[in-house]
Image (cartoon, helix red, strand yellow):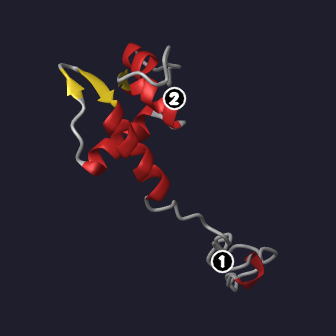
Amino acid sequence: MPGDKYEKYGKRKTPTDPNAEYMTLQETADVLKCSPKTVTRLLDELGLKSKLGRAIVIDSATRRALYEHRIQGPKRVRRTTRRPRKTAAPTASKSSVARPATSELAPAA
């Protein structure tokens, strides 16, 4: 079950003003149409600092850099063909297993 932090920080939040100078991480994620985790990852990739105390606050210049990086950055590699299915190792069939030479019909001596 998700905790309170996930409920507060893990979801996008629509900003009151999309052109504001400063936005929170969740509002920036909504403007960039991605998840807050993606915004955090992009901040780390670009080496941008966006903290104000404990909260992550992103200014408009940083938002523009994040947007440009997302548009021009490396595209995600998608698999075009399916992976081949793994086959199981061949197993010995019951008929090929060696049976003892004694007969069940022979009386025990």
Q: CA distance from mark 2 to mark 1?
A: 54 Å
Q: Which residue is mark 1?
A: 91
As drawn, is 26 to the left or to the right of 78? left
Q: Residue at x 71, y 82 (%)?
A: 102
Please, is residue 69 above or below residue 85 in the view? Answer: above
Instruction: Pick out the residue farthest to the left.
Output: 53
Residue type, numbered disc 1:
Thr
Mark 2 against mark 1, which lies toward the viewer?
2
Q: Position of residue 85 (x, y in %)?
A: 67, 71
Residue type, numbered disc 2:
Asp
Which label sits on residue 30?
2
Q: Residue at x 48, y 17 (%)?
A: 17
Q: Residue at x 76, y 74 (%)?
A: 107
Nearer to me, 69 or 44: 69
- Name the N-terminal-most of marks 2 and 1: 2
Nearer to me, 86 or 74: 74
Please, is residue 105 above or below residue 37 in the view? Answer: below
Please, is residue 89 above or below residue 53 in the view? Answer: below
Q: Please rate how many residues cluster around mark 1, counting C-alpha atoms within 10 Å: few if below 14, some from 14 to 19, many from 20.
A: few
